[in-house]
């Protein structure tokens, strides 16, 4: 099997509309969660979200179609940044065959904002076809493929909050098994009235503030944005002198087959996904230096995730940091796994672990080093980014510094 590496990163988040700004704010312990201003939040469990601000598509992608859904705009901007970061803004010039260059994107709600407009009463029927087109889940592939020139394998995944971790894993599989040489992988979503109301009905939304691993946690806070990585075959990346963030070593995805929102109490699904990802990577537990946890701040998920980590890593779990970035960047749904993977990769690059903010009171059930409130120096040669989602989906990806 061939080896695959990450060479480019792109992001649009509530902490910044590019990766450097996101990372600078994240390790500074800043919180991007703010009151929602783009629609009336009366009747919702909370008026807070990780909303994107000061975003202008034309500054990221000059000439792009301004009629595209806002979530798709975020994805396109993040993809452009990732390709520029990888040094392959023109894939053909870098020697890549468009037929062997592809995209695996992910989302929970697709073009939700366009759907809201499509179903609303309108006097002008002229743009309804555009709104319907932009509301579909797969429209992102059309826009991203046209912008990049990639005409190889492409798909959109939607397995709730594990979606874009799985997107990275599936892109990795396409490369290591020889079906592609270059892949864009990531996820995107935007906050809309219907999506947020549904999440509130499921009672996953905190009525106060997201506090991962804190004893008084009472739910998560959702947000919007996009995150994308470039993954390519190692020897090709080396041949063109690319900067490599890390090698993708292993991946696994599964389902708890238990409950729509609650994890099984013993965390068996998360145990299996973490253990199989490490097995796939050929990495023993004692070699793991950091875990970027899913850490939603919900009552049942956080201790279940900690139990799963301790089950798989044993004593090693108490020797390494296990942090969640959701208190800072919110839960950006389809993009959550990839923005957390980006944080993991930058932690490996800089030797800095992003903190778990809004942490006030320790929970005896979450007794690992959750890096409360302040970033810490820590060398990371091998790390795991873990995701879990509504519906029981789990995914984990393992990275190693070269």
Image (tube, rainbow, N blue to C red):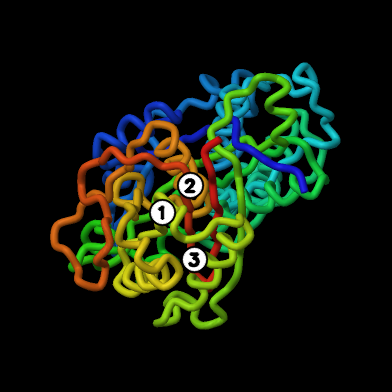
Residue 289 appears left or right of 95: left
Disc on the earlier residue, 3 or 2: 2
Label 2 sits on residue: 382
Which of the 4 image quadrants contains residue 203? bottom left
122 versus 313 height, above or below: above
Closer to the camera in the image, 290 or 61: 290
Given this view, does label 2 or label 1 mark the residue nearer the observer? 2
Label 2 secondary element? strand
Question: Mark 2 and mark 3 in contact (Cβ < 8 Å)?
Answer: no
> Where is residue 65 drawn, in percent x and y?
64, 28
Residue drawn at x 36%, y 73% is: 307
Question: Mark 1 and mark 2 in contact (Cβ < 8 Å)?
Answer: no
Which numbered disc covers residue 389?
A: 3
Question: Mark 1 and mark 3 in contact (Cβ < 8 Å)?
Answer: no
> Where is residue 308 drawn, in percent x and y?
42, 71
Residue 241 appears left or right of 176: left
- In three-dimensional space, the C-alpha distance between marks 3 and 2, rounded to whole angstroms, equals 24 Å
Given this view, does label 3 or label 1 mark the residue nearer the observer? 1
Q: Residue furthest left?
A: 361
Which numbered disc covers residue 291?
A: 1
């Amino acid at each position: 099997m061939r080896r695959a590496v990450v060479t480019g990163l792109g992001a649009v988040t509530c902490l910044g509309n590019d990766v450097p700004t996101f990372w600078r704010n994240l390790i500074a312990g800043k919180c991007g969660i703010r009151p929602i201003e783009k629609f009336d939040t009366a009747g919702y469990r909370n008026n807070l979200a990780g909303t994107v601000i000061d975003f202008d598509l034309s500054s990221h992608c000059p000439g792009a179609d301004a009629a595209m859904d806002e979530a798709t705009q975020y994805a396109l901007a993040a993809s452009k940044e990732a390709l520029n970061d990888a040094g392959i803004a023109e894939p053909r010039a870098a020697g890549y065959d468009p037929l062997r260059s592809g995209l695996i994107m992910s989302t929970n709600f697709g073009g939700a904002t366009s759907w809201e407009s499509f179903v609303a009463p309108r006097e002008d029927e002229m743009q309804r076809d555009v709104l319907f087109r932009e509301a579909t889940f797969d429209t992102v592939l059309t826009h991203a493929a046209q912008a990049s020139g990639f005409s190889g394998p492409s798909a959109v995944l939607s397995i709730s909050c594990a979606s874009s971790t799985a997107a990275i894993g599936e892109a990795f599989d396409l490369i290591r098994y020889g079906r592609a040489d270059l892949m864009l992988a990531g996820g995107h979503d935007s906050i809309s009235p219907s999506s947020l109301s549904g999440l509130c009905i499921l009672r996953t939304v905190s009525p106060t503030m997201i506090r991962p691993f804190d004893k008084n946690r009472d739910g998560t806070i959702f947000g919007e944005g996009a995150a994308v990585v470039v993954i390519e075959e190692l020897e090709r990346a080396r041949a063109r002198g690319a900067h490599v963030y890390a090698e993708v070593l292993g991946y696994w995805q599964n389902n708890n087959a238990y409950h729509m929102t609650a994890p099984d109490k013993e965390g068996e699904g998360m145990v299996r996904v973490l253990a199989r990802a490490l097995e796939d990577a050929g990495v023993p537990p004692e070699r793991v230096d950091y875990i970027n946890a899913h850490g939603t701040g919900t009552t049942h998920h956080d201790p279940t995730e900690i139990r799963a980590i301790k089950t798989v890593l044993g004593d090693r779990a108490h020797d390494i940091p296990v942090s969640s970035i959701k208190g800072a960047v919110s839960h950006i749904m389809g993009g959550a796994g990839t923005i957390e993977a980006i944080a993991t990769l930058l932690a490996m690059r800089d030797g800095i672990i992003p903190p778990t903010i809004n942490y006030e009171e320790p929970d005896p059930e979450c007794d690992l080093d959750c890096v409360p409130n302040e970033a810490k120096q820590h060398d990371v040669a091998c790390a795991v980014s873990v995701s879990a989602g509504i519906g029981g989906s789990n995914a984990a990806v393992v990275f190693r510094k070269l």
